[in-house]
Image (spheres, helix red, strand yellow):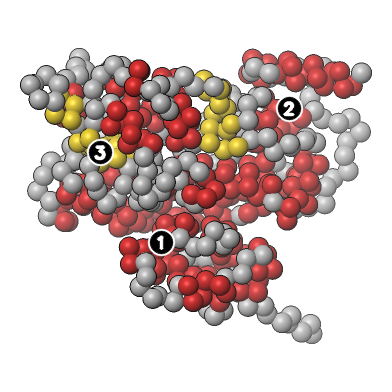
Amino acid sequence: MEEPSKETSLHEKLEKDTGINLSPLKHWWSGDGSMSSRNVCKNGLSRIIDSIINNDESILSSIDIWLMQDVFCATDIAPSETDLERVLEWLRFESIKRDMAPKDNPIFQFYNSFIPPLDTWGRLQPADIGLEKIKQKEEKKKGFFQKLLRGDEEEEEERIPLREIQDLPGFFTFKDSLGEKEE
Amino acid sequence: MKVTLIKSGILSSVYKDFESSMSVCLRQLGIDDETIQNWSDTGEEGPYLTDEKKFLGYTLRNLCIAEKTTRNDKLFIADPVLYQVYRKAIKRLQDPSYENIKNKMLESLEVEYSGRFRAVNILHLMKLQTGGKKFDRLIIRKLGNDRDEEFDPLRIALHTPPEFMRPMSEIKSDHPDNPMIVSSLIHKAGGQCVNWGSFNRWLGGYLTIQLKNDNSSSFNKTTKDYALKIIAPVVQDAHESNAEVIATLDPRGLEAIDTYQETIMKDLGIEKKPLPVMYATDLINISLGMSANRIDSSSRKTNYESVFKKLGLSTS
């Protein structure tokens, strides 16, 4: 049986994934009351920072509305070298990756169900974002617009851009510049 | 000046009034908006909230389309949530640690991405276009009652979405703790921005929306719970400030305040008439000469009659 790999702490994982080290904020947020007007932000931000530094994984399953609001409001308070927005996003994605996101929250379920799985999405295929091995490219390359805007259906030999695209300012210049390149 | 406008599905379907208010305001300020008509609405909010790879994939694809179809370098995003989404995507795509995944995506899309765009919001554009006396010369109508001997300004609880300002070091639009851009325009137009505590409060973004589907009751119940918590202090602050109208640039926030204001007032024991909630751009548009007929408040729980009456505007 394979031995489970040594688990890394939340803080180590954060640093590995984003390069952000929260240690300098530990004492800064220890609650000396020096920023009384910002107390509204204290709970959420302190809780996140403390939980990550102390490897308290319960934070991953408790990203609630107040936490998000507080941290969002606090993004200007932390020293400028600490990207708190990034920390919050990392926490959210980490929570999803570990399947620890709150399951009984219909909002979360809704947004999860909002996006069809990539393989049925039609226009952007799994390979497009590196989820699967990129399929052998067809000999005849499909044009940018066909691939992006019309989907993967078989195109006519002579492809005519969509009417709307033709009408857009800059289209023909773009087309001309392609022509020149080809020559 | 010309900007490329991201027109998401939610703006063009659910918040049509917001879209038109923004467009009119841009035109009044001398900004042409170029819409990408073949914009594929991917519902970027979903991936943004749930899957980083998809979030990058969807936004990159749309940014590529935008780059190919316009020469502008300013990508104007009217909606606060979408502004956040694209600002972060653009930032990620500039980050060397995302270079590999970005290149992989571009390779399979068979397209180049130069990273030309800078995401801008309405505050950036207002700051650019209304400096000095530029805006003063455009004002046609005062925001207040000037029919009596003494001018009585319209008292406005002005809200600026924090998504347009925070983090300040990065966005550089307005000061999140003392936003001045919209309030200075309102002030120039004769309106009075009252002092109130919720001037920069987060209004919940995607968490307060109501779905119209029949089977959305559990979703709507949760968003209602969130909205009541988030919006309660806003309603309380607005009524305490003696404002006559709440004005914001956040379409979801506007809807949430309008929808839940009466319930919150009842809970808090506020015995006053509910306040109308308008887009701040509508007030600016009025001062620049737009007719009240073009502002439709029929879908609002609290209509705008009291505001129009004070300004002496006819809607017939």
Q: Nearer the viewer, mark 2 or mark 1?
A: 1
Residue where numbered disc 2 is placed: A145
Instruction: Identify which residue, B37 or B181, lies in the foreground.
Output: B181
Residue where numbered disc 1 is placed: A70
For residue A84, above or below residue A111: below
Chain identity of mark 3? B
Q: Find the distance from the CA under tag 3 to the CA under tag 2.
A: 48 Å
Q: Quadrant of the N terminus of chain B?
A: top right
Q: Find the distance from the CA under tag 1 to the CA under tag 3.
A: 26 Å
**Residue located at (52% from left, 62% from top):** A79
Farthest front residue?
B132
- Residue A115 placement (x, y as % from top left): 58, 47
Chain identity of mark 2? A
The reply, left or right, for residue A166 in relation to residue B20 is right
Q: Nearer the viewer, mark 3 or mark 2?
A: 3
- Residue A110 placement (x, y as % from top left): 48, 52
Q: Amino acid at mark 2?
A: Phe
Q: Amino acid at mark 1?
A: Asp
Count every numbered label the image shows and give the total: 3
For residue B51, above or below residue A147: below
Q: Amino acid at mark 3?
A: Cys
Q: Quadrant of the C terminus of chain B?
A: top left
Farthest left residue?
B149
The reply, left or right, for residue A33 in relation to residue A80 is left
